[in-house]
Amino acid sequence: GENVEQHPSTLSVQEGDSAVIKCTYSDSASNYFPWYKQELGKRPQLIIDIRSNVGEKKDQRIAVTLNKTAKHFSLHITETQPEDSAVYFCAAWRDSGGYQKVTFGIGTKLQVIP
Amino acid sequence: DTEVTQTPKHLVMGMTNKKSLKCEQHMGHRAMYWYKQKAKKPPELMFVYSYEKLSINESVPSRFSPECPNSSLLNLHLHALQPEDSALYLCASSRTMGYMDEQYFGPGTRLTVT
């Protein structure tokens, strides 16, 4: 099955600095990689995603890069703000026997210090 | 309406009880999902329904029994649970089971088994 590793598990940055979270996956069949933000006590929310035929995608302060050869993808947040503080999960979707399956990374707790 | 609702918000039940979790969406989505999330862990996929038919059962114990009575509703029936089943149970929906369709998560039901 798929194994998704996510680093770091915790990350503290000063407001205005950039934050980078990295994930690696093991199954080359994985081809859809969403990133979720989950604030304390709240539901996960999709913030950005990338498909395997794309190398980079950007949405305002958030960007995701994908390296299919190396099987890793990263989340980049620029000009961080205190409201970016949350747990971020990466995920990898793949086809498995005709069904789509998902494996999540363990999560990164991001703290943006004002 | 772009919301997935879940009831109840909190549930405390004994190991001999029978209870049900409910999930509802009115976005016309035809795929609905149950996830289990333990504290400080990523969501784990339990069940997927596509067009009201069970499509994926990720080897979940039979004490969890899903039901999809119609395209807007998803239930999770609970019976003879164990304390280790205490967790946040998240429902999600997407336009189809195509994994590149964005998943919308509900707020979750926090379950405590005593």
Image (cartoon, rainbow, N blue to C red):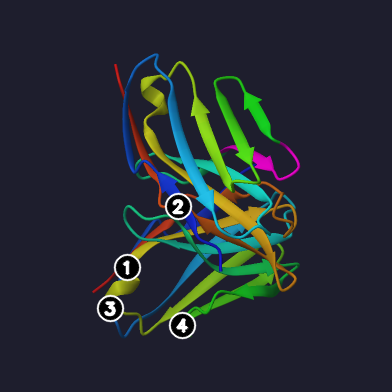
Give the residues in magenta.
A47-54
Q: What residue sits right under mark 2 in the picture? A: A5
Query: Is label 3 or label 2 in front?
Result: 2
Amino acid type, residue under disc 1 in the picture = Ser
As shown in the figure, which amino acid type bears the numbered disc 4? Answer: Pro
- Queried whether the magenta region covers residue B32, the answer comes back as no
Q: Is residue A45 left or right of residue B70?
A: left
Q: Using the image as rendered, state which of residue A75 and residue B10 is in the foreground.
A: A75
Give the labeled residue for mark 4: B61
Marks 2/1: CA–CA distance: 25 Å
User: To which quarter of the image does residue A80 belong?
Assistant: top left
Labels 4 & 3 near each other (Cβ < 8 A) = no
Where the C terminus of chain A falls, by quadrant? top left
Residue A62 screen position, x and y as percent:
55, 26
- CA distance for labels 1 and 3: 11 Å
Question: What residue would you read off at disc 1?
Answer: B86
